[in-house]
Image (tube, grey):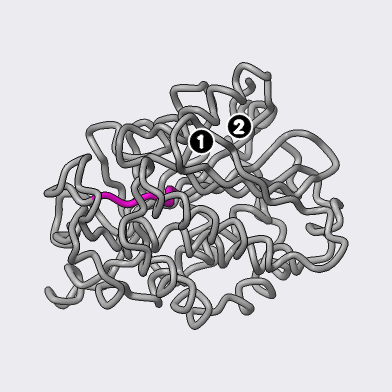
Amino acid sequence: MAAIFESSRNTASGHIPQLAQGETVQNLIDQLSSTNMRRNLETFSIFNYRYYQLETGNQSAEWLLAQARSYLPPGSPVTVSIFPHVYRQSSIVATITGKTAKTIVVGAHQDSINGAAGRNGTTARAPGADDNGSGSMTTLEAFRVLIQHSAIANGSAQHTIEFHWYAAEEVGLLGSSNIFRAYAEEGRDIAAVLNQDMTGYTAGYTSHNMTPKFGVVTDRTDAYLTDFTRRIIGAYTVTDGSDTQCYYSCSDHNSVTRAGYSSAFIFEGEMHDVNDYPYAHSEQDTIEKVDFRHMIEHAKLVVGIVVELAFAVL
C-alpha cells in the first residue's frame, strides 16, 4: 500500500501534484444543485432512525442504493452495489473504473443515532440531517455530477474512482473498518480517501457574525493529502479552511488510516469552537439546521479533489 504521491515526494515542487484540471472542475461545479441536495436530504431524513441494526437502517440504505443507481444513464459501465455486513445495514460502493486500479475514494457515513435512546431505542427518532445526512447527500450530489463527465464515466480517467456510503459509523466505525480491512487484505491500491462527515451546519459562525469555514482535520489524517486538499479548497471554493483536530477516532477517516491508506477529513467547521453542532445524535438534528450553501462548498471540494487526482500522475 503505497502512500499518496510517493513518487513526487522528492521533487523540488513539493509533495503534491500540480492542479491541472481547472476548466473541467469549474464546468462540473456549475452543475451542482442545492435544490437536488435538499430534495434528497428531505427524503433521507424522513427515515425514522437509520440505525445499523434496525429495518429502517436497512431501508435507508436501500433508498440510497436506488437513488445513486437512478443517476446512471442506460448502459453505463459505472456500478453501484452493496457491501454487505453481518448487521442489517449495508454499506454502498459506487465504482467508476479508470485506466488503472489505483483508486481515489470519497466516503460518508449514512447511519444515524439517538444518543439519549441508546442502542435499544428502536422507536426513537434520529433524523440525522446534519450527522450525517449532509455528508451523505453532499457525496451523492458530487457523484451525480461527476458521472455526467464523459471521460470519467467511460473509463478514460487515469485512475479508478469510488464513492462510499458507510454503515454503522456511529457505533465504532464498523462499516468503513470492514471495507478498508478487506481492501488491505486484498492488496487494493487506494491512493487517497476523502471523508465527508457533517457538511451543513454554520449557525455557530453566523450567530457570532463570523464567516463559516471548513475544518481541516489534522489528526489521524495524511499530511500530504491534507496539504493537497487545502490547495483544492483555495482553488475551487470560496470558503477558507482552518486547521482543527478531533482528538479521538471521530469518523471514518480513522479506519482508512488504520488500514495503512492516506486519508483527509474536511469538517463543516472548526471543532471544539463556536460552530460545534449542539443537535448531533438527537431528534433535533433536522433539516432546518442545515445550510445548503455550505453543503455546496463541500461538494465543490469533492468534485475538485476527485477530478484532479483521477487525472493526475500518482
Q: Please, what is the three-letter code of the amino acid marked with disc 1?
A: Tyr
Pointers 2 and 1 in contact (C-beta within 8 Å) = yes
User: Residue sitting at 74 percent across and 65 percent down?
Assistant: 72
Q: Quadrant of the N terminus?
A: top right
Q: Which residue matches tag 2?
A: 4
Q: Tell me which numbered mark, 2 or 1, is placed earlier along the sequence.
A: 2
Marking on residue 224: 1
- Residue 244 image point, x, y percent: 27, 46
Query: Is 8 left or right of 53, judged from the image as shown?
Result: right
Query: Residue visible at 39% across and 40% down?
Result: 168
Distance, label 2 to label 1, CA atoms, is: 7 Å
Residue 206 percent coordinates (x, y): 20, 76
Q: In what quadrant of the picture does the C terminus appear?
A: top right
Q: Quadrant of residue 118?
A: top left
Residue furthest toward the top?
A: 185
In this rendering, position of residue 223 left or right of residue 184: left
Residue beneath the point at 51% across and 65% down: 299
Main secondary-structure element of the magenta-colored stretch: loop
Start-end of magenta stretch: 109-113
- In the rendered view, tell whether residue 98 sits above or below residue 56: above
Question: Is 26 on the left-hand or right-hand side of 299?
Answer: right
Rendered image quadrant of residue 240: bottom left
Amino acid under label 2?
Ile
What number of labels is visible?
A: 2
**Viewer-nearest residue: 38 or 51:** 51
Locate residue 291: give its quadrant. bottom left
Left or right of residue 299: residue 219: left
Asked which secondary structure carries label 1, the reply is helix
Between residue 287 and residue 120, name the one nearer to us: 120
